Image (cartoon, rainbow, N blue to C red):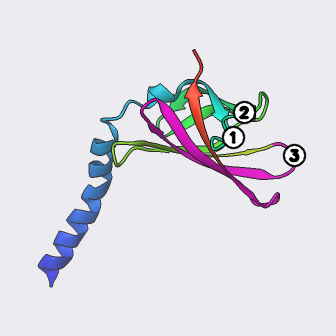
């Protein structure tokens, strides 16, 4: 029984090292820049756009603005454990908080934004502005 306990403890202690090894293979700096968000990608005839500006990557987090200038990103997190960049953030414009998640694939961000107080979930895509 002691042997099993020791093996479980060793395995649990090694998990953070495995995660760090996996996440070091992905360049999260590709997120830095200004992104044009198409807030209704299913409708190619509209002009419903927003922005996300990521100014700095800090470890597993980032700094910037979301939706429009002046709306600061809060509680941002990045996860690269699967070799894909996943991100999450909170923003707000005075009407409530917006919970946003996205992933990066092929130069495009694919995301969703959930506003609990406004009772909606928006699905969007974003391309990086030059």
Secondary structure found at label 1: loop
**Label 2, on which residue?**
50
**Could you tell me residue 51's position as x and y percent?**
69, 30
Q: Quadrant of residue 49?
A: top right
Q: Which residues are magenta?
A: 93-122
Q: Residue at x 58, y 45 (%)?
A: 111
What residue did someone put label 3 on? Answer: 94
- Which label belongs to residue 95? none
Image quarter where the C terminus lies is: top right
89 within the magenta span? no
- Where is mark 1, residue-wise? 39
Q: Are marks 2 and 1 in contact (CB under 8 Å)?
A: yes
Q: Is residue 129 above or below residue 84?
A: above
Image x and y of residue 119, in percent: 78, 61
Q: Position of residue 23 (x, y in %)?
A: 34, 41
- 48 sits left or right of 113 in the view: right
């Amino acid at each position: 029984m002691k042997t099993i306990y020791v093996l479980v403890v060793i395995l649990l202690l090694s998990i953070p090292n495995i995660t760090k090894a996996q996440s070091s293979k992905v360049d999260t700096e590709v997120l830095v820049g200004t992104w044009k968000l198409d807030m209704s990608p299913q409708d190619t005839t509209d002009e419903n756009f927003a922005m996300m500006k990521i100014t700095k990557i800090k470890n597993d987090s980032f700094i910037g603005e979301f939706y429009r200038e002046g709306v600061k990103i809060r509680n941002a997190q990045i996860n690269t454990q699967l070799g894909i960049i996943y991100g999450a953030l909170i923003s707000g414009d005075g009407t409530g908080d917006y919970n946003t998640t996205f992933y990066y694939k092929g130069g495009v961000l694919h995301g969703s934004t959930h506003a609990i107080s406004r009772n909606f979930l928006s699905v969007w895509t974003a391309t990086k502005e030059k």
